[in-house]
Amino acid sequence: MGKCSVCGAKAVIRIPYARINLCEKHFVEYYERRIERTIVRYGLISKGMRIVVAISGGKDSASLAYVLSKIADKYDLKLLILHIDLGINNYSTKAREVVEEFSKLIKVPAAIISVKDVLSLGIPELAKLSRRPTCSVCGLVKRYIMNAFAIEVRADAVCTGHNMDDIMVNILKEFLNQNFEGMVKLVPKTLSQNGIAVGRIRPLYETTEREDLAYALINNLPFLKVTCPYMNIGGIDTDLKRYLHHLDSKYSGIRISFIRRFVSNVEKYWKHIANEGEVNKCKYCGLISQGDTCSFCNLTKRVLGEPAGPKVREYIRSYLRDHMLSYLNDDLGSD
């Protein structure tokens, strides 16, 4: 590994695209500065924002939330952790414990929304009944709950721990499928929509998975060290990620160059989207939908016999009144 390019001490990591080796101290400084520069570059945060930080229990979201907690005072941020307990047996139990420990560490309250408490069954059971892939159902449910929760706490943004590797893999998958509508959503920041959807921000947009792991380990952050049992490790995501790493090892900096060019050129893809600008409201839950009914209400109506969107929203309101009202300092029970 050699010596730190800044101070000459023993290096613990090499940053290939920057052509530098860094010791623990200077890597931490580099990592935190990079996230803040990403925030500034893409205008992700402004002073006084209320931000819901979605934390799965993994290294990426833990590293992100830790950095945000360190700069919260500087930007006058109101942070709130959201963890969704997916009901995946021991995996979800461990994830929940990690998030509770992490919440105490950074002194930011965590709202833990259990899918089983709301729907009376977990993600595996819901996927089985719907006859859809588990990961597909999981993603749909998580996106819905994140948005519903953010709406109820009147958040300015939902912050997720998607890193540069995640984003690039998804961009390439959507391109291979010629799904331009999916591609244009993979930007560092999406905008809120008229009280029916809260915008997303991705401060790890220019940070690699390897860097997230190093930061979490150096700072001794609690995070899950096992993967979800339903993760498809032999799928296209793994192959694409491996290939991108191979390319970057041969052509240093190609990933960061790609992701920045994608953002600068993303508007060119809008012309391929037939329903550009169309925003609808679900007739059941009142949240964003492509048609009359949102995907979550469609799924739950088909599987459970009734759309569960209204039930989820009421559960979240009740949870907030019982656990978060003093912190949020709002009358969250009123519409």
Image: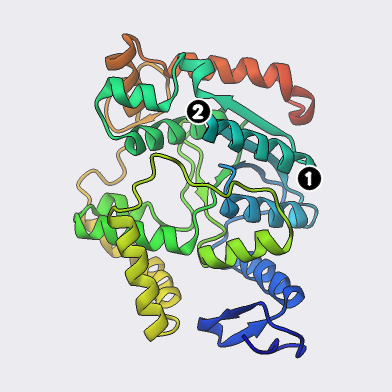
Nearer to us in this view, 134 or 89:
89
Which residue is identified by label 2?
A: 89
How far apart are labels 2 and 1 at the CA level?
Answer: 25 Å
Q: Is residue 10 above or below residue 99?
A: below
Q: Amino acid at mark 2?
A: Asn
Quick one: SS at disc 1? helix
Q: Are marks 2 and 1 in contact (CB under 8 Å)?
A: no
Q: Most extreme residue toward the top, as rendered?
A: 305
Helix, strand or loop at mark 2: helix
Q: Residue at x 77, y 46 (%)?
A: 106
Instruction: Look at discs 2 and 1 and give the one toward the viewer.
Output: 2
Q: Residue 104 versus residue 164: which sits nearer the camera?
A: 104
Q: Quadrant of the N terminus?
A: bottom right
Question: What percent of the width, then of the height, locates residue 318?
Answer: 63, 15
Q: Residue at x 24, y 60 (%)?
A: 175
Please give the name of the residue rendered at 30% of the width and 50% of the height, measured from the top-left corner: 182
Residue 230 x/y as whole percent: 38, 39
Left or right for 178, reference 209: left
Residue, x 48% and y 58% (percent of image)? 188
Q: Position of residue 301 (x, y in %)?
A: 31, 14
Say few, some or many: other residues with alpha carbon within 10 Å of mark 2 (under 14 / 14 to 19 / 20 or more): few
Q: Quarter of the image holding residue 265?
A: bottom left
Q: Is residue 316 left or right of residue 131?
A: right
Q: Which residue is mark 1?
A: 105
